[in-house]
Amino acid sequence: MKHKLLVAVAFSLAAGLGMASASAVAQATHAAHASPAAQVDVSDAWARGTVPGQTSSAVYMTLQAHQPTTLLSVSTPVAANADVHEMKLDGTLMKMRALPKGLPLEANKPVELKPGSYHIMLTDLKTPLKKGDTVPVTLKFETADHKTSELQVQATVRDLTAAPAGGGMAGMAGMAHGAHK
């Protein structure tokens, strides 16, 4: 009963205040499901919109763990594949690679998943992502003492051209995203 009340209050507050951020809902849902395992705050979860025929996109957010934790894996019903990726400059080339061992999160240090850096890569999309839609994403975490937990996040789809200052998906069109498994 307490879980349902917490989730209902979070949804009511988010809707009533017109908040697009998934932070309040994600934290309330996580708190209600929380075990002694990973306590991770999520803010500003969003996904990049697509155009007809586009089969990949990305999800971004800021994660902050309360203890050393690893983002082990991700999943979503909107894509056949969802992986944690990193983009890194290698000489003069920007390269993207999957992080098969996950993304380490230091205690109380925010990690921003953003264009041109860490992100959640979605491949083999099952449907186009349209501005204003939401993408459900399940994040699986593991603490240093090997306790696992999952967190459900709703990422709001933004316009295809949306990118924070200093980042972008330029140059990603020619990358073979499906090869990262």
Image: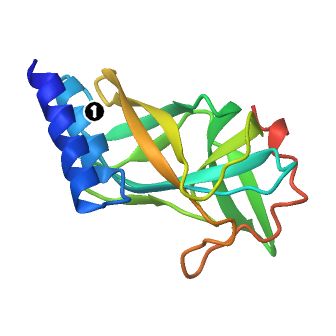
- In this rendering, the answer to whether 68 lies above or below 140 is below
Please identify the quarter of the rendering in which residue 38 is found. top left
For the N terminus, give its image quadrant.
Answer: top left
Residue at the extreme right of the image, as rendered: 174
- In this rendering, the answer to whether 24 lies above or below 101 is below
Q: Is residue 4 visible?
A: yes
Characterize the local packing of mark 1: few (<14), some (14-19) or many (20 or more) Cα atoms within 10 angstroms: many
Q: Is residue 45 left or right of residue 95?
A: left
Q: Is residue 86 left or right of residue 71?
A: right
Near-viewer residue (146 or 28): 28
Q: Is residue 11 left or right of residue 116?
A: left
Query: Which residue is drawn at the image coordinates 53% and 31% (left, top)?
Result: 73
Residue at the extreme bottom of the image, as rendered: 165
Q: Which amino acid does label 1 sit on?
A: Ala
Please identify the quarter of the rendering in which residue 165 is found. bottom right
Q: Is residue 34 visible?
A: no
Name the residue beneath numbered marker 1.
38
| Image label count | 1
Please identify the quarter of the rendering in which residue 148 is found. top left
Give how far across and how far down residue 67 sits, in percent.
23, 42
Give how far across and how far down residue 101 sits, in percent.
56, 33
Query: Which residue is drawn at the image coordinates 81% and 61% (left, top)?
Result: 172
Near-viewer residue (170 or 4): 4
Dot 1 falls on a residue whose secondary structure is loop
Give how far across and how far down residue 128 sits, in percent.
73, 46
